[in-house]
Image (cartoon, helix red, strand yellow):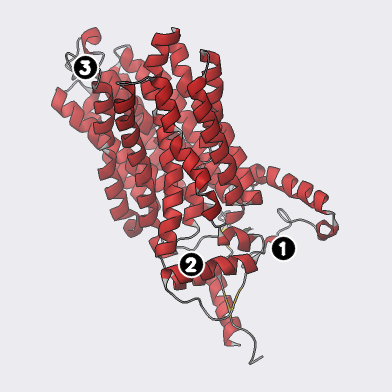
């Protein structure tokens, strides 16, 4: 046994090749996807009023332009999660980019309101795959650096919202809303242009048992990062073939190519139900609750900022009110309020790898609760602006940490499905928020609205507290191993697994 080849795991390889030029390229593409999603999502803020003036829909119909995007994202989250966890991250990227860019561009030529709704729904389906970009990037980053670099990835969303406000300011004051829809589809087309350069996730390949292709990608990473690969052979830690709940039978390998694809699709369709297996049900439900509360708060604060500035004359409050509003104020306001997200990103970057994901969410939730509390009563204009700025900072920080935490909690075999569906549940919170909380403010019930926001913050903090385990500095799992003594999923490629391979090496 002295001449037995050395072996190494994927996590050992990622630690050896480090974080460098290759991950910077991966970050650029994943960030472009997040940037494109922010642009397509934010543009309705500027298009809605123009559509109302051209076609004359009611305010309720105008709000449907946002609702159908949320609804599409709910559908897309499951579709792209299923495709990415079954056929690979690259296949998910291709479908998302084609649908988002195509439907986004065609919506600029909508002949009527109904057709515009249909195109925006299709765009929403494409946007539903946003978590796939995060999961894909996450799978290239060594465990010690995941938190910080995932925060860096989240900055692309903020830059996207600011870019769209700037683009709308330029386009809408000179051309019209159709041009804005067309220009806003360009980043999604860029995803298609650079698609051929995108590598598959080596973690996904290892999970599927394709260690040869995974090894080739790791060699490319080492070359670009100017580092060295570990000596020996890459081994897959997957226990997929031993887990009866998830694995194909031996007869599967004897099926024809067509039948294999059918079996693979059936297995993919079961991914959603795997999220409710005994080992993942608690995690799934708590993540849904966390995301629902976070998105309710995040989008609620955005809508609340606008509503509080417009209800003063109606409700006779001392809320801030911008007198002599100019046409440009909408774009200026959207740009400035987006700046609140940078302190939130910075705060999350500072604490996420120091205190962990769970405690980071709890700390920023407590901070948001305290900052929002004075708005239970009417405050001066300057204080109100400052408090809303602070709450949006915290909301962005919580949302950023949740985007890191969710994919880390799931094994590779269901990572994009689990994170995507959780993200979709958050969109439901975003859909409901304008109808409930913002509606209360519009009807001069500000105190009730703020109390509702406070209750949602508490819900989010409790959900984070009850999540089964912390992921800070922990290697990602590849497949689910169900422990007989606990409901907490075990990591197949945890340090214990690495120690096993180290023992083999020593032999």
Instruction: Residue at 37%, 36% (x, y): give it.
Output: 458
Q: Quadrant of the C terminus?
A: bottom right
Residue 320's place in the image compared with 74, above or below, is above
**Mark 3 burial class by Cα count in 10 Å: few <14, some 14-19, many 20+:** few
Task: Tell which of 58 and 481 is nearer to you.
Answer: 58
Residue in view at x 29 percent, y 29 percent? 334
Q: Earlier in the sequence, mark 1 or mark 3?
A: 1
Q: Secondary structure at mark 1?
A: helix
Residue at the front extreme of this rendering: 174
The residues tagged by marks 1 and 3 sit, at their Cα atoms, a distance apart of: 66 Å
Given residues 142 and 453, the one toward you in this image is: 142
Residue under pointer 3: 326
- The front one of 330 and 186 is 186
Task: Say whether marks 2 and 1 touch (CB < 8 Å).
Answer: no
Residue 332 position within the rendered picture, expressed as x and y whole percent measured from the top left: 24, 27
Residue 121 in view (yes/no): yes
Q: Against 314, is 132 above or below?
A: below
Q: Nearer the viewer, mark 1 or mark 3?
A: 3
Side of 306 where 400 appears, left or right: right
Relative height, residue 389 to residue 281 (above, below)? above
- Label for residue 221? 2
Sequence-earlier tag: 2 or 1: 2
Q: How busy is the neighbourhood of tag 2: few (under 14 within 10 Å), some, or many (20 plus)?
A: many
Q: Residue under circle 1?
A: 242
Q: CA distance from mark 2 to mark 1?
A: 31 Å
Distance from Cα at disc 2 to Cα at disc 3: 51 Å
């Amino acid at each position: 046994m002295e001449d037995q080849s050395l072996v190494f795991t994927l996590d050992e390889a990622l630690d050896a090749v480090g974080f460098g030029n290759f991950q910077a390229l991966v970050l650029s593409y994943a960030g472009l996807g997040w940037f494109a999603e922010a642009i397509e999502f934010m543009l309705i803020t500027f298009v809605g009023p123009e559509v109302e003036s051209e076609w004359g829909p009611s305010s309720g119909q105008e709000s449907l332009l946002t609702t159908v995007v949320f609804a599409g994202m709910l559908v897309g989250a499951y579709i792209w999660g299923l495709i990415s966890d079954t056929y690979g991250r690259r296949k998910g990227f291709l479908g998302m980019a084609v649908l988002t860019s195509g439907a986004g561009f065609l919506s600029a030529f909508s002949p009527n309101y109904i057709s515009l709704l249909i195109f925006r729904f299709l765009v929403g389906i494409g946007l539903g795959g946003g978590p796939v970009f995060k999961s894909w990037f996450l799978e290239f980053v060594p465990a010690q650096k995941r938190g910080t670099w995932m925060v860096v990835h989240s900055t692309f969303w903020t830059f996207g919202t600011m870019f769209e406000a700037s683009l709308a300011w330029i386009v809408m004051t000179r051309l019209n809303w159709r041009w804005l829809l067309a220009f806003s589809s360009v980043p999604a087309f860029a995803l298609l242009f650079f698609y051929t350069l995108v590598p598959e996730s080596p973690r996904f390949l290892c999970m599927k048992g394709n260690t040869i292709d995974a090894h080739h990608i790791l060699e490319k990473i080492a070359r670009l990062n100017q580092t060295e690969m570990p000596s020996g052979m890459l081994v897959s830690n997957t226990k997929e073939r031993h887990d009866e709940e998830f694995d194909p039978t031996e007869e599967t390998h004897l099926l024809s190519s067509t039948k294999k694809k059918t079996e693979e699709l059936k297995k993919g369709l079961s991914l959603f139900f795997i999220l409710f297996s005994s080992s993942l049900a608690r995690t799934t439900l708590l993540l849904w609750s966390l995301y629902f509360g976070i998105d309710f708060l995040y989008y609620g604060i955005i809508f609340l900022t606008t509503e509080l500035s417009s209800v003063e004359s109606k409700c006779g409050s001392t809320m801030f009110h911008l007198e002599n509003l100019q046409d440009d104020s909408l774009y200026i306001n959207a740009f400035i309020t987006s700046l609140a997200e940078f302190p939130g990103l910075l705060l999350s970057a500072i604490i996420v790898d120091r205190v962990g994901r769970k405690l980071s969410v709890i700390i920023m939730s407590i901070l948001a609760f305290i900052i929002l509390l004075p708005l239970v009563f009417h405050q001066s204009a300057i204080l109100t602006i400052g408090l809303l700025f602070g709450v949006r900072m915290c909301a962005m920080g919580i949302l950023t940490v949740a985007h890191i935490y969710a994919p880390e909690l799931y094994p590779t075999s269901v990572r994009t499905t689990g994170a995507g569906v959780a993200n979709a549940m958050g969109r439901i919170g975003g859909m409901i928020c304008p109808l409930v909380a913002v509606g209360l403010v519009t009807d001069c019930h500000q105190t009730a609205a703020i109390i509702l926001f406070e209750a949602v913050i508490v819900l989010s903090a409790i959900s984070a507290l009850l999540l089964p385990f912390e992921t800070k500095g922990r290697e990602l799992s590849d497949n689910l191993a169900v422990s007989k003594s606990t409901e907490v999923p075990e990591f197949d490629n945890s340090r214990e697994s690495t120690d096993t391979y180290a023992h083999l090496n020593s032999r």
